[in-house]
Structures are given as structure tokens and as C-alpha cells.
Image (cartoon, rainbow, N blue to C red):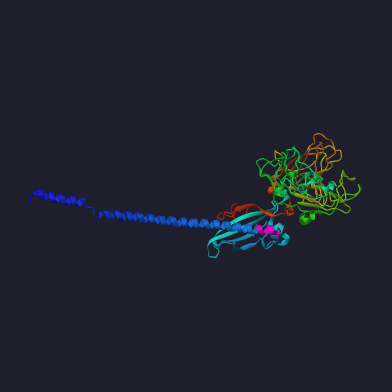
Amino acid sequence: MTLIHLTQRVLARALRRLRAEDGFTMVIALGVMTVASMLVAATYVALNGDVYTTQHDLDGKRAYYAARAGENAFLYQLNQNPDYWATCSNDYKPSPVSVPGATTGELYSFIPVYNPGYASSTCTVGTAIAALIDGPTGTLRMEFTGYAGKPDASGLPSVTRTIVVGFRKATPLDYLWYTDHEMKDPALDSNCTNEKYYYQYASVSQAPCPIYWVTNDVMNGPLYTNDQYLIYSNASPIFGRAGSDDATESSAPKKYGICAANNCQNAKFLGQGAVPGAQSVALPSSNSATTLQADAQANGVVIPGGTTTITLNGGNSTVYNCPGTTSSAACSTDPRYTWVNQPTPSIIYVQNGAGCPSTYVINTTYPVNSQGHYYGACGDVYVTGTYSQPLTIVSDHDIIVLANNGSSTGITTSEDANGNPTGNAMLGLVAADFVRVMHGQNQSSNHITIDAAILTLSHSFMVDNWDSGSSGSPPKLTIHGAIAQRYRGAVGTTGGTGYLKDYHYDDRLHVLLPPYLFDIAISGWKVMRETLCNQSASSSDPTACAYQG
């Protein structure tokens, strides 16, 4: 073998060894397996975290709906018995109970949000309103906690959610206009005694005392009646405010329609529009059907009888009680009845005295005694002025808003540039019989404004002698608030006497009420507000479970 051949063989062998892949594939395979193992491990970790997150999220949702189940169970009990809450025990269930029908162990518990100074140990039947009802809003506030997930060391499900719910009764003050009957008050006309609604007559022409809605009637707010609205032929009144939540409701059977004779003529229903067959909202039948007198005895003033004049001046008032039946009778100077430069009590209740006539006097007058004050045996209340503090005035007879009384006419509070009341001062006028606007016989009228929630439990809101006086272009009766009446009252005529209506709902009534007017609501409860607590927040955080308002 020559040297050349030997060299070629060595080179060939070296090239074959260089081309060989023995062992290299194994290195690559090991690398791939290592990377794959790392990916599998990462995937497992990621999926395990997602599984935990998904399960926790699911448990959170289950806990929230468990709290909602407690809310609905409590609301059901409230609507079976409107005074269910007032025991101070039915609404205190801190020990969790099972959600009915739950198959995965969900529980709920609930406790009230007590007013300052009260707790479960100090809440009694006698103090239930003071302990549990938020005065300005008239709401019962409750905390509901739902439980779900795996048990913790205490044996309870480990995931919780808490909601704070405000319950409130449906009230006539939810509406600018509330009537039980849309016909004339029987106390004002002996022909109006049938106590029927329009839909209970074979035809509207058989209704003895109709009152029509006409073209110039504009109602800037929500309306409700247990009757039907009677619209004058071809008239186009406007109900509700455009772009608002206002509804025009009637609880008359839906088949009869919202308007008498099922004919709304050219009426316009703005906001949510016309709502026939609405849920019934009741009005108390009398003062004795409320607890207002007891509220006044405990927290305000009860005047035992006789005509009373209240002049409001910001946070102060002057009160004259004149119970005599002759012009020479003196007025009371009892300091309980007269406040000068002192805070006004939150509720004043005036009772009837002996000898008060039970019927309204047509063509009424306004007797003044030798001291220049209105007098009489009835618990009539004459009221005027401006106010800056919450106040409720209750009469066992009539409340008369003074008008045409020099520069002090009507009742007003602070207002914005558009005339809407502002601040937290709310005025309630509650009369067992009538709330009336002073208007003498054959007397011309001046523009008058009333900023108040008006309730007449047995009769009407009206203008005295509405059908007499100068005719032509009548002034406006402007109201910012609410009007609730048993029967529809008259304020003027198409002949130009009395007043034109200029009515506006005070939207503050959705969240604020005059003092103690929570007690006039006798209808069912509804949820006004629901807030999900942020359990991770500090107690000073408004979103924390410690209720902040």
C-alpha cells in the first residue's frame, strides 16, 4: 500500500467520523424534553391559579346572590306584614341560615343599620322608629351578608359578600299629584255622594261631579290616581316632564284605560308615559290612622285645641293659639305655643277644640279677633312665611295658606335660579280635612308660591271661593312639592276666577321627607337603594362595609 493510499484511507475514515451523528440526537432530545417539561410545569401552575381564581370568583358570585336571597326573603316578610321590622328582633339575624333550595351550602345573615345611639340591645318596639328609620329619607337600612365556598376554621363558608339595602314604603309623596277620586269632594257638593270612580259608571255623563283636565294644565312631575283622568273634549294637557322618569299612573283596572271613557283626547304623557293598571298606593284614612300625634307628643308640640297661626321665619317661628269663639277671646301666650328667635320644633300637631263644626263652610270667611289674630274652636292652622328647617304641621281640621296678606304670602324656602327648592329643609302640611289657599269672596288674586308636601287625608286641596272674584287672566298658584288628596279639589274656573295651576314635583322628596311623614305610608315596601360593600377597604372608606349614609 503506497503512502498515498494510506493517507486517503485515513482521511476517508476521519470524514466518516465527522459525518456521524451518534449521540448528538440524544442531546437535542434531552433539550426538547427539558423545555417541554418546563412548559408543562408552567401550564400547570397557570391553570392551577386560574382554577383557584375561577372558583373564588364563582364563590363570590354565589355569596352575592345569597345576600340577595336574604334581601328578597326579608322584603317578602315586609310585604306580608308591613310592621314586620318594628319588633327589633325580626330584622336582627346575625347567625347565618341556609339559602332555601341551595345545593352548594350558601348561607345568609342580616342586621339593621342602627341610627346613632342605638344598638340591638337598646332597640325596642317603642323606640323602633328612632332606632331603625333614617329620618330624612324614611328608609329602613339593612346589611345582608351572603356566604359561599369551602368552610373556614369557624365552619362557615369562607367567601362573603355584604350589601346594604334601603327599604322604603310606597308613599303618596312619590308623586306630584295623587288622588283617590278625581271627582269633586262630596263635602263641597251634596250631589257628590256616590263614592264611585269614573270607570264604575256606564258612561262619564252619569258621573255627578266631574272635574276636567284642560289644555292649559301642565303637570311637571309624576302623577297617580286610583281613579281615571277625565280629559276635556279635544284638550291637550301635559303630564310629566320630557326626559325624566315621570310616569302618569292609574290603578283602575287596565281594561278600562288610564283616561275616563278610555279617551285621553289630545293629552301628552311625557317621561315614562301612561301606566294603566298600576300597583295600588294607599292614603291613610284619618289622622288617627297615623302615629303623627304620638310623634308630636314625643318629639314636638301638641296644641290641645283651637285655631292657630304660624308665621315661619327661617329657622324660627311665631305661633298664636286662639281657641275662643268670639272676637274678644284672648290668644294663648303659653311658651310651648310661641317661639320667637328659637328653633322650630320638628312637628306641631293642632287638635280640634269643643264646638268645631264638622262640615266645610261654603263662601268661607276668616274671622279675626281684637288682637288681630285668626280665632275659632277648630284646630285650623293658618300658615305663611319662609323656612330653613324641616317641619311638619298637622291639623285635626284644616290648614289655610295665607295669601293676599301684604308682602307675606305663601310658604317658601331657599330656591335656585329656576325656582326649585334647595337644601335639606322640607315642609309637610297634613290636614285631616282640607288644605286651603286663602281667597276671599269676590277677591282678586295675587300670585302665590307654596314649597311643601301637601296631604289632605279625608278631603281636598283647594282654593277658597275659587269660583268668585275678578275674571280674566288669573294669576298662578305655583307649587313645588307634592299634593295628595282624597278627592280632587278646585283652584279656579275656565271663566278666569281663582288660579291657574303651576305645579312642579320637588325631586328632593325621592330622598328626603318632612319629619315623621314616614308614618303616613301604609302601602307595601320597595327597595330604594342597594350598595355592594368593599370589604377590603378601611372603615373610613365610604365604600367599606361600615355603612356611610
Hey, which quadrant is residue 448 in on the image? top right
Query: Which residue reaches farthest top?
Result: 472
Residue 82 falls inside the magenta stretch: yes
**Magenta-drawn stretch, dominant element (helix, strand or loop):** helix
Q: Position of residue 545 (x, y in %)?
A: 60, 55
Query: Which residue reaches farthest front?
Result: 202
Q: Position of residue 546 (x, y in %)?
A: 61, 55
Task: Identify which residue, 3 or 229, lies in the foreground.
Answer: 229
Work out whether 70 lies above or below 329: below
Taking the image as shown, residue 464 lies to the left or right of residue 266, namely right
Magenta region: 75-83
Residue 341 falls inside the magenta stretch: no
Q: Position of residue 143 (x, y in %)?
A: 62, 57
Task: Identify which residue, 231 or 14, lies in the foreground.
Answer: 231
How many marks the image carries: the answer is 0
Can residue 117 be seen in the rendering of this structure? no
Can residue 441 be seen in the rendering of this structure? yes
Taking the image as shown, residue 229 lies to the left or right of residue 107, namely right
Residue appearing at x 67%, y 40% in the figure = 242
Task: Identify which residue, 143 or 495, lies in the foreground.
Answer: 495
Q: Position of residue 149 (x, y in %)?
A: 53, 61
Taking the image as shown, residue 467 lies to the left or right of residue 40, namely right
